[in-house]
Image (spheres, rainbow, N blue to C red):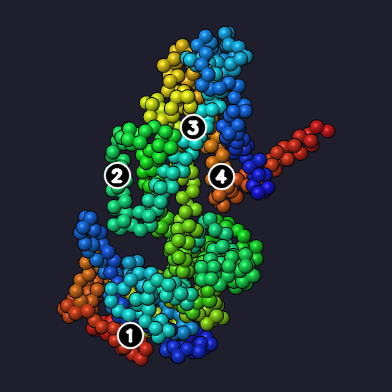
């Protein structure tokens, strides 16, 4: 899987470079307003995130709750505005694209949602749901017209043929997620953000859906941003992995490099929390536990966000945030001491 | 269409409701043909006659006569016209207007929401009857005035309810999904948000219908609504209540008409609500199938025991 992947047949020059380039983006949410005329106080969610995703690649994005994983995904898809930084898609700056242009952009970038129960309209049949992207982009005039195409899509994602005219409530969580994937695939996008697509599913179904995504990615030459908090799932599906902590990227590297020789103390701690299915090895492992909680998004400290919890922290860490630098070839981390 | 009729046939309460509504509407439309008397003809000699099944009743006046000797049955049939038209039009007008305001406030959010909802608050705080008195005093009483005025004082509840639902539905991932695949705003509203409003709006509209019929009665009683030779159920209830101890039929029959109408609309609307919700509809279907199977099993069981 980590072998060089075949590029999808793409004539554009961008095919050789990254399909998506995130450059130093920051995102703030509006905090509560205290009155009708008062200005909202912003709450920071992301701070200076940068990474590239190459065509046909799966980038795993990992972080704990509140670290900004989903915000990153939605900022890339232009669902949330960024306060600074740039997003390049196929070499084109899409940071400020709006209106009809943005709508057209949706044909090329899609999303698979976390909650398969809430992300399908209960009043629309599977056919209507999956055909809707085609209808709104004027590719077909009605859902009926798309029946053949949808039937093929449903086959690809492994749903029974007769699923088309049934409603979402008749399906299990895993099947619903397959419907969601079919909807995302309908427009034949180049890039899909999978926002924790399996975290709401039963463990037994998880592997099936992850494997489905992996197969689709390989067969259709998709580029995936796979957001998750489950490290073993991410290891299974990703080519490269990025670790997010409290709105900042702390480490990004090839999968094997990151899992075998992590650089950042936070990554080390995260990996030490994943049990190994071998009692002997598991016994010999040391679990790293850093005291404290993830920092409050409303009140970020100066310096490195981990400095309050990190055993290696020095004064420098609490004053100046470490930049993300290439410590080893292709392996970037943000730490003063490693 | 046929399949729908069959489905209605299987749901007996819904069917009863539907049949009653059709009957009432037909009676209202065909009033001049089926009413035995002119509802305004007075006969002072035969005033306050009881219904036919009572000691002094006779077949000339099935449901008796009122304090001016007018035939109650005829008045009910003619009264259906006003009550239905006023009730339905006011609910439709107020529902559309209030619903639109609520949709706008909930969908836009932010300052639009604040301004619109404060307008609603102001209107709620203002005494409705005073506003009605003012408007009717200026324009003069008529059916149209009454409909407009009642709609003007009753739209706020729709705005509030709709806004609340839109706020919660708007946060649903499937609405976000619709936006992410590139749906235009109008499509998001009409395909994804509005369908979720139908059942609460239906319920609210039916409850409001009763209120409107009674409000129309109050206005007519004050002389601001239906003008005398014309009649309505509400008007008859209001005037009849002075005679409640002497002649109970004066208030009972028009009151019964109001409640039967509301009940039948309720029964039918409940069927409609279930039919428009795929999940509920499937459940009902499954229940019907289970009932049929149980019945067959019981019959088969009985058959086995007898020989």
Q: Earlier in the sequence, mark 3 or mark 2?
A: 3
Chain at tag 4: B
Q: Residue furthest right?
A: B307
Instruction: Report which quarter residue A174 is drawn in.
Output: bottom right
* Same-subunit check for callouts 3 and 4: yes
Pointer 3 local density, CA inside 10 Å: few below 14, some 14–19, many at least 20: many
- Mark found first going from the N terminus, 2 or 4: 2
Instruction: Identify whether B116 is placed above or below B188.
Output: above
Q: What's the CA distance linking mark 3 and mark 2?
A: 29 Å
For this rendering, which residue is in front, A332 or A309? A332
Residue B158 percent across, percent down from the top left = 40, 45
Labels 3 and 2 in the same subunit:
yes
Nearer-N-terminus badge (3/4): 3
Q: Which mark is residue B121?
A: 2
Comparing labels 4 and 1, the label whose residue is closer to the camera: 4
Image position, residue A36 (x, y; %) = 23, 55
- Subunit bearing disc 2: B
**Please, what secondary structure does the residue beneath circle 3 have?**
helix
């Amino acid at each position: 899987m980590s072998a060089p992947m075949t590029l999808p047949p793409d004539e554009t020059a961008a095919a050789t470079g990254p399909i998506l380039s995130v450059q130093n983006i920051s995102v703030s949410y509006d905090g509560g307003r205290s009155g009708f005329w008062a200005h909202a106080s912003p709450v920071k969610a992301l701070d200076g995130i940068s990474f590239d995703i190459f065509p046909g690649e799966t980038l795993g994005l990992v972080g704990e709750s509140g670290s900004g994983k989903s915000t990153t995904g939605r900022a890339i898809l232009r669902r949330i505005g960024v306060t600074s930084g740039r997003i390049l898609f196929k070499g084109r700056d899409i940071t400020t694209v709006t209106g009809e242009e943005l709508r057209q952009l949706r044909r090329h970038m899609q999303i698979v949602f976390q909650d398969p129960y809430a992300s399908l309209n209960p009043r629309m049949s599977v056919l209507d749901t999956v055909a809707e992207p085609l209808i709104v982009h004027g590719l077909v005039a009605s859902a009926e017209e798309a029946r053949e195409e949808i039937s093929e899509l449903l086959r690809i994602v492994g749903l029974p043929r007769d699923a088309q005219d049934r409603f979402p409530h008749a399906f299990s969580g895993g099947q619903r997620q397959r419907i969601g994937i079919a909807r995302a695939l309908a427009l034949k996008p180049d890039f899909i953000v999978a926002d924790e697509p399996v975290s709401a599913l039963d463990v037994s179904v998880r592997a099936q859906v992850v494997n489905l995504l992996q197969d689709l990615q390989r067969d259709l030459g998709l580029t995936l941003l796979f957001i998750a908090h489950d490290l073993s799932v991410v290891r299974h599906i990703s080519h490269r992995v990025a670790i997010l902590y409290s709105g900042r990227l702390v480490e990004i590297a090839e999968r094997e490099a990151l899992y075998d020789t992590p650089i950042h103390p936070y990554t080390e701690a995260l990996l030490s929390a994943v049990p190994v299915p071998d009692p002997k090895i598991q016994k010999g492992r040391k679990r790293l536990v850093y005291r404290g909680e993830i920092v409050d998004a409303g009140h970020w400290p100066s310096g490195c966000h981990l400095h309050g919890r990190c055993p290696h922290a020095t004064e420098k860490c609490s004053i100046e945030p470490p930049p993300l630098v290439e410590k080893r070839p292709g392996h970037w981390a943000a730490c003063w001491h490693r | 269409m046929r399949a729908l009729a069959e489905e209605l046939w299987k749901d007996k309460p819904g069917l009863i409701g539907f049949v009653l509504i059709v009957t009432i509407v037909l009676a209202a439309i065909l009033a001049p043909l089926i009413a035995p008397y002119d509802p305004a003809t007075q006969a002072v000699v035969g005033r306050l006659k009881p219904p036919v099944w009572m000691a002094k009743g006779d077949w000339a006046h099935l449901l008796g006569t009122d304090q001016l000797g007018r035939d109650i049955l005829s008045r009910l049939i003619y009264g259906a016209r006003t009550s239905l038209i006023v009730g339905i039009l006011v609910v439709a007008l107020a529902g559309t207007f209030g619903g639109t305001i609520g949709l706008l406030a909930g969908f836009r959010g932010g300052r639009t929401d604040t301004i619109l909802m404060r307008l609603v608050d102001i209107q709620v705080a203002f005494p409705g009857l005073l506003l009605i008195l003012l408007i009717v005093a200026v324009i003069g009483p008529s059916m149209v005035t009454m409909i407009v005025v009642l709609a003007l004082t009753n739209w706020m509840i729709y705005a509030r309810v709709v806004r609340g639902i839109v706020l919660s539905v708007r946060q649903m991932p499937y609405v976000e999904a619709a936006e992410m695949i590139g749906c235009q705003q109008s499509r998001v509203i009409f395909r994804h948000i509005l369908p979720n409003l139908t059942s609460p709006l239906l319920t609210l509209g039916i409850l409001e219908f009763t209120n409107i019929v009674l409000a129309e009665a109050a206005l007519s009683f004050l002389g601001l609504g239906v003008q005398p030779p014309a009649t309505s159920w509400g008007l008859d209830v209001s005037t009849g209540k002075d005679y409640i101890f002497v002649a109970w039929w004066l208030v009972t029959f028009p009151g019964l008409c109001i409640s039967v109408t509301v009940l039948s609309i309720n029964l039918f609307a409940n069927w409609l609500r279930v039919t428009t919700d795929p999940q509920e509809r499937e459940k009902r279907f499954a229940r019907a199938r289970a009932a049929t199977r149980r019945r067959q099993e019981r019959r088969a069981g009985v058959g086995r025991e007898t020989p």
